[in-house]
Image: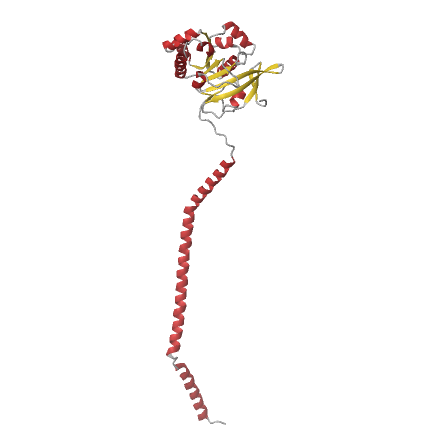
Amino acid sequence: MKSEKEMIKKAANSKKIEAGKKLKKVPDSRIKAEINKKIKKLGIKSKIKKKKSNIKKIISHKIKDKKKIKPKIKKVKASKKIKIISKHKIPTKKSKIERISTGIKGVDEISEGGFGKNSTNLIIGDGGSGKTIFGVQFLADGIKKGEKCLYITFEEKKEDFYENMESLYFDLNKFEKEGKFFFIEYTPEKVKTMLEEGGGAIESLILKEKIKRVVIDSMTSFGLLFKSDLEKRESILSLFNMLKKWDCTTLLTYEGDTGDSRTNPDILELESDSAIILYLIKEKNARKRYLEILMMRGTSHSSKTYEFSIEKDGIVLHKGKK
């Protein structure tokens, strides 16, 4: 057995060893390495933090930019849609000219709604083609719409005219009593005097009654008054200027050449805002009526010829028959 002294020595030595271990110094290189590792770790973290913060800033800027850009994108898209829709729309150009109905539904449909407001319009046709009926139908349409109308004739007698129109359900006596319709029977010479006077009694009536539609039937007799073409031209120009001054839509009838061989248009055609031809053609054992819009200023009108008939209510255009 070991002595007590030896045991005490061993115990003392073991304590010294442990104390030595604790007191044993760590080499400087190892410490530096550890420190560098920690520094590197800290550096990476700071860089990551910086990157994250930068990314957040970039994202926030992008979001702000998107918010600013979005409405512009929407507008662009909307305009594109509008363009696409417009491509598929039916090209129907509406005329800017204010329209006055002709009183004949079919004619309105092929002339963008009828005559231009305050225009002077010419109806050309042979005897019996329907010129007078066209004129009365035009006036009757105005009366229905609350407009006052005037009919000036060089050839018709009032009683005969009223009776003929009554058979077509145009009660002109009734319209006259109501103060909506005015009838003037004038000789061509009186019209010539009216032009020399600058309007005369007709102008006074139109301005006083605020007449909006006028029919002069027929200009054929008026044209025969003049010896030379120059005199005729000057008088017609004076008449047209007067009609425009009256602030009303006018229809003139004229018995002129309606054949295909017509080459030189009359002065009336040249000065009118529109010209419509009514044909009366013999086909086999019957005569048929046809209508053609020869010209209408500022209007995309049909260039086709249409058959029409005179019914109880006036002229009816047959658009299916050409």
Say how the picture is coloured.
secondary structure
Viewer-proximal residue, 280 or 140?
280
Measuring from the top left, give residue 210's x and y in whole percent. Answer: 42, 14
| Residue located at (44% from left, 87% from top) | 14
Measuring from the top left, give residue 72's x and y in whole percent. Answer: 42, 44
| Residue located at (43% from left, 48% from top) | 66
* Above or below, 277 relative to 187: below
Measuring from the top left, give residue 97's x and y in whole percent. Answer: 44, 24
* Above or below, 111 relative to 12: above
* Above or below, 285 relative to 28: above
Viewer-proximal residue, 51 or 262?
262
* Above or below, 22 relative to 279: below
Measuring from the top left, give residue 285's x and y in whole percent. Answer: 63, 14
| Residue located at (39% from left, 67% from top) | 42
Viewer-proximal residue, 67 or 107?
107
In which image quadrant can residue 192 be found? Answer: top left
